[in-house]
Amino acid sequence: MSVARSPYASAAARWPLVARSGELGAVAAGLSDRRCQAVILHGQAGVGKTRLAEECLDRALGAGHPGGRAVASAAAAAIPLGAVAHLLPGKPVADDPVAAFARAIVTLRSGKGTRRYVLLVDDLHLLDTTSATLISQLLQTEHLFLIATVREGEPRTAAVRSLDSGDRVRRISLGHLGQVDIEELLEQVLGGPVEGQTLQMLSAASGGNLLYLRELLLGAMSAGTLNAYNGVSRLRELPVGTGALADLIDVRLCSAGPEERDALEILALTGPLELRIAEAQIPSATLERLETRGLVQVRTDGGRHSVDLAHPLHGQVLRRRIPGLRRRRLLLAQSELLEASGCRRRGDPLRVATWRLEATGAADPALLLRAASLARYAFDYQHAARLARAALAQEESFQACLLLGETLYELGEFEESDGVLQRAGTLAKTDKERLLGVLQRVKNLFWGTLRIREALDVNDRARESLTSPPARDALNVSEATVKAFGGAPHRALELLEGLDGMDPRSRVMGALARTAALAEVGRTAEALDLSESAYRAHAEVTDLVAVSHPSSQLISRVYALCEAGRLDDAVAVAERGYRDAVADRAPIPQAWLALNLGRSHHLAGRAASARRWYAEAAQVSAVHHFTAQRRLSVAGLALAESLLGDVDAADCALSELSDLTTAGWVRPDARVAPAWRMAAGGDLTSAREVLRDAASDAREQGLWTMEAQLLSEIARLGDPGGTVTRLAELAELCDGAFVRARAQHAAALADRDPLKLAEATSDLEDMGAYLTAAECAAASASAHRRLGDFRSANAMSVRARKLAAQCEGARTPGLAWLDSAMPLTGRQQEIALLAARGLTSKEIAARLVLSIRTVDNHLQRAYAKLGVTSRAELAGALEMPPPDAS
């Protein structure tokens, strides 16, 4: 289902302008103010000065101003008036400034009315003196308005400096774009959202420099490393940019002398160095020159000073140019210097081990293990795995196997992880080591390989030999995690009694499982209280083995917030956790939180947003072999596509879903997707049967909030009567506001009571469940109309439309009759939907176990209510895709 694409046309064309509205307004204000002669845009190379200036000129020309453009350059500067000669009428007059001025005045005055001539000069700092003098004179006449760009740090002549100063000149400094602005820009250029890690990579590599960003993107597309899955773009590897970008950076660096080049190469290989370490080998004068020229920068963090290259891409280009033997010599020298200094910082062993490994392919095993641990606790799993492999290659040990097994799990290499963890078990010498190996292996078996029975067997066998209270608690938490996330929440809660008395690792991991179980059984308030404190506690124990990323605590919190009827809060918390996971390069919580963002938006009714997040979750899960998350994500994607009426895309997602292994526990609510696909095709009867089976499974497993959701879907698809009693029971069992609202909604639908439906609409709207609220309001309008209260019916119809407008194009049977003159009954609705899909009366009768005469009678009444005369007109009246789309 993943489709590669290379949108060269949009990326290579002129990019849209983002995050510059304030600057555009400032230039426009300057042009409208006769006291202002010029606006000068200052900034480093590549920040978008030229693009902004061009936009300002285009807008001025569009407003009726005459204008033109001049590009200053070193070549043009050698010729008087070389930059502006093409704008002057007649033959060149470089040797006669008076004549040049006179001719220029003619051009300026030829414009319409009193509008000033707008002149754009790109790279004003390169302008020749004669041109600068002429422009300065023309500005005094007030017939000319200057928009110019200046690159920071470049030398300028006195004539140019005079243009860039004075009370009648406004200077605007442009900085680099932030990540939020880069995201907006890339979405416009690529025509869709960008996966989180990709956005972070491009933001970090470009440093917010627009020119660099553009060349990185073009380079990725040229190399075929940028792909899209359901509209979400993702880089398969770090971007390297184009040859043009490398040449551009080379030009920037080529002015460095031998001593300066040495310093730049050291920093390119090592990254930031403590200033005292840098000054021990690089003369202070050299560092000062490099800082003045903007090639290095000094940072201060907690009283410590460090020096680094000014831009990450400079290091990338430099590293590619350093010969192998020189690289080895420099890295070993840095290792020795840092070791001689005492490796005072926590991360210093990691740096030394990395440098020695890169230089020689080996390092002290103890140092490698210490470095691997530091990398793992910093969530740098790729680096940790590399170091642990190197340590294991030199000396087999339990710690090396455990570290490697854990990092392989986090990277999605589950089968290899299991083999390494089994080896760790044979190397364990103490009960503590045996316990840690078991805990990590159970985690990998359950979440990674989806071998639930084997995971529980491994856990049970460990109980026979590991009998201490701490071991008992840890193994209970391990089993409870499998039960909580594997369809047995009540058993999980039994195992998790007495969390407060456990050790820190068991406490935070137990809280994660307990929050999930509480949310599933409807004890929402407890789940929310626990998840808040657990998240804070989790952040303090990330340096313990087999402890997941802290954002993992937020996954179940998001679920609980949804059940509490706080959908906006759920989205906010999921976004916070997602950003943290992306920042720390933690793919497992990234996939889960993207999935939960999809679910939160789906429950809110924002179908397009749900599709976007489900697509990212499915993409990340596929890349990292997260089968459990991928199944749920692809199911969510099929659901969102069905709600949006794209049945072909929904079928494609369901086909992908059918290809995924069914090993492990499959959540009953995964069947919501095929049910809604059936509903999108008009087969409400089959859709409800699928949901009834799923609801029955959820009830049997004690998943009460899930059961409530499934029953609510049945009510929304035309059979509220069959759900009312059980939903009322669940509303008593569960404390979440959403379960109560679902019960209220179903009861009001079954009674066809317009006032109760209006009340349910308000409750759902207050929660942010806009799609279900819109359907409820439409049902209220229908009930009012049936009773002859057309004023109230119209008011509720208006309300339903307003709510539906927030649902990003979602289309459901509950909204299909919103614009009809008379409401359809449930049976008329079902038959009309099937007829609109192209089924004959005989086929409909067979499916619904009715006579053909009954089907035709219902169909004729539906025609009359919808204002149509044939089956061919039904699809349009019901706002459905044509029959061949199914």
Image (cartoon, grey):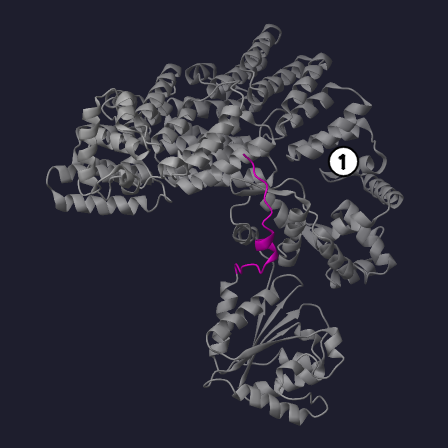
Q: Is residue 549 visible?
A: no
How packed mark 1 is, by other alpha carbons closer than 10 Å (few <14, some 14-19, many 20 or more), is: many
Q: Does residue 297 lie above or below 75 as drawn?
A: above
**Quadrant of the image for the N terminus?**
top right
Q: Secondary structure at mark 1?
A: helix
Which residue lies at the image location 38% right of the left edge and 19% below the top edge? 698
Chief secondary structure of the magenta portion: loop
* Foreground residue among 445 and 525: 445
Farthest residue to the left: give it.
Answer: 788
Please, what is the three-letter code of the amino acid marked with disc 1?
Pro
Snapshot quadrant of residue 792: top left
Q: Does residue 867 lie above or below 639 as drawn?
A: below
Farthest residue to the top: give it.
Answer: 464
- Residue 677 image position (x, y, % from top left): 39, 31
- Residue 833 image position (x, y, % from top left): 29, 33
**Quadrant of the image for the C terminus?**
top left
Which residue lies at the image location 71% right of the left edge and 34% below the top edge? 383
* Foreground residue among 305 and 20: 20
10 within the magenta span: yes
Q: Is residue 307 visible?
A: yes
- Residue 683 image position (x, y, % from top left): 32, 28
Q: Is 74 left, or right, of 850 in this rendering?
A: right
- Residue 380 image position (x, y, % from top left): 66, 35
Mark 1 sits on what residue? 349
Q: Is 157 left, or right, of 637 in this rendering?
A: right
5 within the magenta span: yes
Which residue lies at the image location 81% right of the left edge and 35% below the top edge? 357
Q: What is the span of residues highlighted in magenta in the rendered image?
A: 1-19
Q: How many marks?
A: 1
Q: Is 732 left, or right, of 376 in this rendering?
A: left
